[in-house]
Image (cartoon, helix red, strand yellow):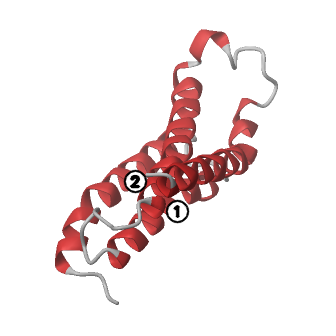
Amino acid sequence: MPMTRQGLVRLLPLLLGVIIIGAWFADVQQNGPYVIRNLLPPAFVVVLAAWVLIKSGGTWRITDWRLPLATVGYAIPAIGLSTYLHYAFAVNLDGLFTDATQPGELFRFLPVYTIVAGLIGFAIGWIIGRNV
């Protein structure tokens, strides 16, 4: 089933938000080698949201709440943790990166951590959605 016009309209704010976050990630990392890698977890949120909208016919309402709640469960740590750590790096939060020999290496493994945290959130959302 293809994406409806209504679904595209509902997906657009999320897509624009991820694009803005991606531009900010590139700015914080000064276009370093890990920008694309760090865009994968937020981009996967867009893929999950598109999947929900396709399955539900262009709305966020669906008879089975597992997939929408699992998508939110993935998005919170995937976007939230990644954005928070980019912010902490940008402002050197509490001197966190002052004595680090290679502070930019944070971004090397950050996508792995956010994806794992997102998958845990996805599982929690799936379980909650099953019981709704």
x then y, percent, for residue 83: 50, 37
In this view of the protein, which residue sits in the foreground, 8 or 131?
131
* Callouts 1 and 2 close, C-beta under 8 Å: no
Counting every numbered tag in the picture gives: 2
Q: Residue furthest right?
A: 101
State the mark number for residue 108: none
For the point 23% across and 63% down, the residue is: 10
| Residue wearing tag 1 | 44
> Counting residues from the N terminus, which is met first, the one under dot 1 or under dot 2?
2
* Kind of residue at badge 2: Val
Is 101 situated above or below 7? above
Label 1 to label 2: alpha-carbon separation = 10 Å
x then y, percent, for residue 32: 63, 48
In this view of the protein, which residue sits in the foreground, 118 or 95?
118
For the point 65% across and 11% down, the residue is: 95
Circle 2 SS class:
helix
Q: Residue furthest bottom?
A: 1
- Classify mark 2: residues with Cα within 10 Å, few (<14), some (14-19) or many (20+): many
In this view of the protein, which residue sits in the foreground, 60 or 3?
60
- Classify mark 1: residues with Cα within 10 Å, few (<14), some (14-19) or many (20+): some
x then y, percent, for residue 36: 59, 59
In this view of the protein, which residue sits in the foreground, 10 or 100?
10
For the point 17% across and 73% down, the residue is: 6
For the point 31% across and 74% down, the residue is: 56
Q: Residue furthest top?
A: 94
Quarter holding residue 99: top right
* Kind of residue at badge 1: Phe
Q: Nearer the viewer, mark 1 or mark 2?
A: 1
Quarter holding residue 41: bottom right
Q: Quadrant of the N terminus?
A: bottom left
State the mark number for residue 18: 2
Circle 1 SS class:
helix
